[in-house]
Amino acid sequence: MSDFGCVVSFELAGGAPAAERVANALKLFARAASLGATESLVLPSQFMSTRDLDAAQVQISGIRPGTVRLSIGIEALEDLQADLQQALDAAAD
């Protein structure tokens, strides 16, 4: 197998507002609470449920206010990279 997707997450220093700005600025990533399909997806932390976890479990989960999860689909890598870069740049403004 040479082509496959993946799920990656990262944390933005600007917290939940920055994560929301990045998610809103993405053009090729659909916002969805899923681990994937053929299209690329984005999920900012406010949509990752930790409500059933106690404080210690939330800490272990690694989900912070600035966490963004991306599920990478079948779009061209260069297009996804450019889209993510423009969204990160927009969030920094």
Image (cartoon, rainbow, N blue to C red):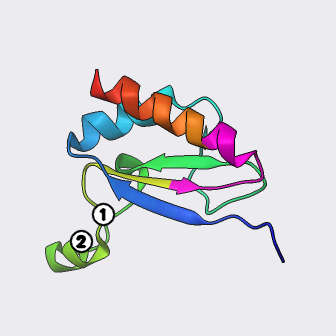
Amino acid identity at mark 1 = Ile
Query: Does the magenta portion include 89?
Result: no
Q: Earlier in the sequence, mark 1 or mark 2?
A: 2
Magenta residues span 70-80
Could you say where residue 33 lies in the image, as x and y percent from the top left?
56, 54
Q: Which residue is mark 1?
A: 63
- Residue situated in front as seen by the camera: 86 or 42: 86
Crowding around mark 2 (Cα neighbors within 10 Å: few <14, some 14 to 19, many 20+) is some
Query: Does the magenta portion include 74?
Result: yes
Could you say where residue 74 lies in the image, as x and y percent from the top left?
78, 53
User: Which residue in the rendered view is the most extreme toward the left?
Assistant: 55
State if disc 2 and disc 1 touch (CB < 8 Å).
Answer: yes
Mark number, residue 58: 2
Could you say where residue 37 lies in the image, as x and y percent from the top left?
75, 57
Q: Where is the N terminus found, in terms of image quarters?
A: bottom right
- Give the tally of numbered discs: 2
Residue at image coords 37%, 57%: 10
Q: How far, Cα to Cα, is label 1 from label 2? A: 7 Å
Residue at image coords 67%, 42%: 78
Q: Is 7 rendered above or below residue 61?
A: above
- Residue situated in front as seen by the camera: 66 or 5: 5
Could you say where residue 91 lies in the image, as x and y percent from the top left?
34, 28
Q: Where is the C terminus found, in terms of image quarters?
A: top left
With 52 as the anchor, is 8 left or right in this view? right
Residue at image coords 49%, 49%: 43
Dot 2 lies on which element? helix
